[in-house]
Image (cartoon, helix red, strand yellow):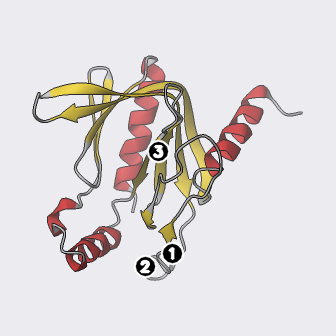
């Protein structure tokens, strides 16, 4: 017999799959999260007007088990026809993990790919160099916990704060994100 928790996990997996078809496993979900972005000019957190359920998940990648190389980098192009913006999680694929917040406030969700694989980061820097972009502007993801915010510095240097009211859920998400950024 299927429990409500199992049903909820399956439903969250299916909804997330409509936005990122490379989802492999739904690692965790949180019922409510608010997303903030740090503003360097004001040295303050700005609410992004994004709040809703947060999904943390592992993604399928074509990885050579002997070398660890990611084969067949592919451009991610979401073509979901619905009311939500679908150009999320785009770019060259190589992200092992994903974070998504389904926005209840607006029709734009928050999504972030996570991979601190050195080969992936070096490849991204090489691609940026070919495009005459700053090669040092593709960083390793970093995560920290300050008071009530989980702080995450993205590959592109943006600093986001995730507010989760329940302390137990907040600590679980923080610890999972720490694992995401240390696994390669």
Secondary structure state at the residue bearing disc 1: loop
Secondary structure state at the residue bearing disc 3: strand
Q: In front here: 107 or 40?
A: 107
Q: In front here: 139 or 116?
A: 139
Q: Which residue is mark 2?
A: 69
Label 1, label 3: how far apart the Cα atoms are: 20 Å
Could you say which disc has been placed on residue 63 in the image? 1
- Badge nearest the viewer, 3 or 2: 3
Could you say which disc has been placed on residue 177 in the image? none
Q: Position of residue 172 (x, y in %)?
A: 46, 32
Q: Position of residue 31 (x, y in %)?
A: 56, 25
Label 3, label 2: how far apart the Cα atoms are: 23 Å
Q: Quadrant of the C terminus?
A: bottom left
Q: Is residue 142 left or right of residue 111?
A: left
Q: Quadrant of residue 44?
A: top left
Mark 2 closeness class: few <14, some 14–19, many ≥20 residues within 10 Å: some
Secondary structure state at the residue bearing disc 2: loop
User: Relative to 113, is 121 above or below?
Assistant: below
Q: Which residue is mark 3?
A: 99
Mark 3 closeness class: few <14, some 14–19, many ≥20 residues within 10 Å: some
Q: Quadrant of the N terminus?
A: top right
């Amino acid at each position: 017999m299927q429990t409500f928790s199992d049903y909820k996990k399956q439903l969250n997996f299916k909804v997330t799959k409509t936005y990122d078809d490379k989802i492999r496993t739904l690692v965790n979900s949180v019922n409510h999260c608010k997303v903030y972005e740090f503003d360097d000019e004001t040295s303050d957190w700005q609410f992004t007007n994004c709040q809703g359920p947060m999904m943390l998940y592992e993604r399928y990648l074509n990885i050579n088990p002997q070398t660890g190389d990611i084969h067949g980098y592919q451009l991610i192009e979401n073509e979901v026809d619905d009311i939500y913006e679908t150009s999320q999680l785009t770019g060259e694929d190589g992200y092992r993990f994903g974070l998504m917040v389904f926005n209840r406030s607006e029709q734009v969700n928050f999504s972030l790919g996570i991979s601190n694989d050195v080969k992936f980061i070096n490849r991204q820097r090489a691609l940026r160099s070919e495009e005459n972009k700053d090669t040092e502007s593709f960083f390793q993801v970093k995560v920290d916990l300050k008071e009530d915010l989980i702080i995450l510095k993205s590959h592109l240097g943006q600093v986001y704060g995730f507010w989760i009211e329940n302390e137990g859920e907040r600590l679980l998400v923080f610890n999972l994100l720490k694992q995401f950024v240390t696994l390669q």
